[in-house]
Image (cartoon, grey):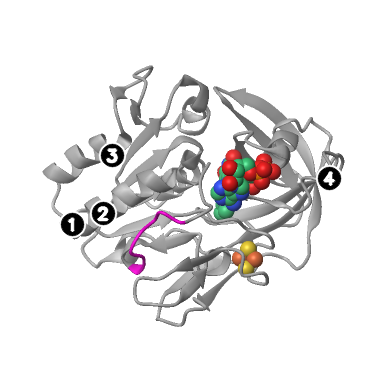
C-alpha cells in the first residue's frame, strides 16, 4: 500500500511512502534482547503494512505508561530497524537506548506485553537512482542508536541489488550495540571514539577516506546519528557534491503533522515538519543538521 505523496513544503520533493492505517493498534511484544549497550524489542503487527526504511512508528506501552509523575505522557518516536513477514502478521524490530522514562519503559518490555503502535509514518530513504541518474551505489553512515534505520535500509538495498558500504561509529562501549544482531548479513566498518572497536576516532574519518577514493556521483550517502555527526556528513557531502539523505530527529509529540513540535528550518526559508516532510531529508534542503532540542 504505497502512494505518491507531495512533501507539505510543496517544493517538488516527492517520495513513495507507506501510509499508516488510521488510529493506533495493539501489538504483542514477542521478544526483547540485549544488544550491547542497547536493547532490541520486537512486536508482531497483525495488520500494518510493511514499512519502508527510514519510516518510524509512535510507540506507547499498554501498561506502565505515565507511571513516573505522569511521565511518559505522549508516545515516543522510533525508527523501524527491521520488518519481516511472520505467521499472524509482520514482525517489527526496534533498537532502543534508555535515556528517559519512555525509552526506559520500552527497553523493559517483556514477551506478551502489549504495545500501542501508530505507523509507519514519515518519508523513507530514496533509492540511489532517485537522487541522481548516474548514482548506482550507497554508503550508509550510522552513529550510535542511529544505526537502526540503516539496518533495514541495508537489507532493502541488498534486495534491490545496490552495492552498499556501511560505516558505523560509537562513542564508547556503553553506547554501542546492535551491529552483530542487525547487520549479520554484511561487512561493516566500525569506528569508536574510545577505541574499543575499529578505528579510534569518528565514523566521519572513515567516510572521508571513502569519499576521497570515490567519484562524487558514484554513490549516495545515507546517514543517521547524533546532530554533530549528521552536520559533519552534510558538510562533507556538500563540499564534494555528493548526494546525501539524513534521517533526522526532533522532539515529536504527535508524529503526523498536527502539533508543529518538530519544525526544522529549511535552507531556502520557511520550515518543514520533520514528522511528515522527514524524518529522511535531502541534505541539500537544510543549512545545518544542528537542530535545537534534538539528539541525546
Ligand atoms: C523519527 C525518530 C526516530 C527515533 N528513533 C529512535 C530509535 O530507533 N531508537 C531510540 O532509542 N530512540 C529513537 N528516537 C529518539 C527517541 O524518540 C527519544 O529518545 C525518546 O522520545 C526519549 O523519550 P524518553 O521519555 O525516554 O526521554 P525524555 O525524558 O523525553 O528525553 C530524554 C533525552 O532525550 C532527548 N530527546 C527526547 N526526545 C527526543 C527526540 N525526539 N529527538 C531527539 N532527542 C530527544 C531529550 O532532550 C533528553 O535529553 C527517535 C526519535 C525520532 C524523532
Ligand atoms: S510531531 Fe507533531 S507536527 Fe510533527
Magenta highlight on residue 88: no
Q: Earlier in the sequence, mark 1 or mark 4?
A: 4
- Residue picked out by circle 4: 66
**Callout in the foreground (1, 4):** 4
Label 1: which residue? 239
Q: Position of residue 238 (x, y in %)?
A: 23, 59
Label 3 or label 1, whichever comes before in sequence order: 3
**What kind of secondary structure does the magenta stretch mostly adopt?**
loop
The numbered mark, 4 or 3, whose residue comes first in the sequence reads 4
Give the image quarter of residue 187.
top left
Tag in front: 4 or 3: 4
- Helix, strand or loop at disc 3? helix
Tell me the SS state at disc 2: helix
Q: CA distance from mark 4 to mark 3?
A: 38 Å
Mark 1 secondary-structure assignment = helix
The quadrant of the rendering that contains the N terminus is bottom right
Q: CA distance from mark 1 to mark 4?
A: 46 Å
In the picture provided, is 22 more to the left or to the right than 197? right
Which residue is located at x 72 percent, y 49 percent? Answer: 59
Left or right position of 81 against 172: right
Instruction: Quote the CA–CA distance across marks 1 and 2.
Output: 6 Å
Closest to the observer, 206 or 217? 206
Does the CB distance between marks 1 and 2 fall below 8 Å? yes
Amino acid at each position: 500500500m504505497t502512494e505518491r505523496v507531495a512533501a507539505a513544503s510543496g517544493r517538488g520533493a516527492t517520495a513513495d511512502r507507506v501510509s499508516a492505517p488510521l488510529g493506533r493498534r495493539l501489538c504483542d511484544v514477542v521478544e526483547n534482547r540485549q544488544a550491547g549497550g542497547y536493547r532490541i524489542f520486537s512486536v508482531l503487527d497483525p495488520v500494518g503494512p510493511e514499512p519502508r526504511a527510514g519510516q518510524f512508528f509512535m510507540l506507547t506501552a499498554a501498561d506502565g505508561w505515565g507511571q513516573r509523575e505522569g511521565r511518559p505522557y505522549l508516545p515516543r518516536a522510533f525508527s523501524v530497524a527491521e520488518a519481516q513477514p511472520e505467521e499472524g502478521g509482520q514482525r517489527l524490530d526496534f533498537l532502543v537506548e534508555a535515556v528517559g522514562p519512555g525509552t526506559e519503559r520500552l527497553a523493559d518490555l517483556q514477551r506478551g506485553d502489549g504495545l500501542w503502535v501508530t505507523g509507519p509514518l514519515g518519508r523513507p530513504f530514496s533509492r540511489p537512482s532517485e537522487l541522481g541518474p548516474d548514482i548506482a551505489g550507497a554508503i550508509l553512515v550510522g552513529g550510535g542508536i542511529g544505526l537502526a534505520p540503516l539496518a533495514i535500509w541495508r537489507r532493502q538495498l541488498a534486495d534491490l541489488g545496490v552495492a552498499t558500504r556501511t560505516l558505523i561509529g560509537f562513542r564508547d562501549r556503553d553506547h554501542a550495540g546492535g551491529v552483530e544482531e542487525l547487520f549479520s548479513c554484511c561487512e561493516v566498518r566500525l569506528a569508536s571514539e574510545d577505541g574499543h572497536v575499529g578505528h579510534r576516532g569518528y565514523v566521519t574519518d572513515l567516510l572521508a577516506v571513502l569519499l576521497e577514493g570515490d567519484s562524487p556521483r558514484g554513490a549516495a550517502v545515507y546517514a543517521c546519528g547524533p546532530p554533530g555527526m549528521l552536520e559533519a556528513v552534510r558538510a562533507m557531502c556538500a563540499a564534494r557534491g555528493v548526494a546525501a539523505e539524513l534521517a533526522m530527529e526532533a522532539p515529536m509529540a504527535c508524529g503526523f503533522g498536527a502539533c508543529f513540535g518538530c519544525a526544522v528550518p529549511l535552507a531556502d526559508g520557511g520550515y518543514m515538519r520533520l514528522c511528515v516532510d522527514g524524518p529522511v531529508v535531502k541534505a541539500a534542503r537544510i543549512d545545518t543538521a544542528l537542530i535545537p532540542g534534538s539528539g541525546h
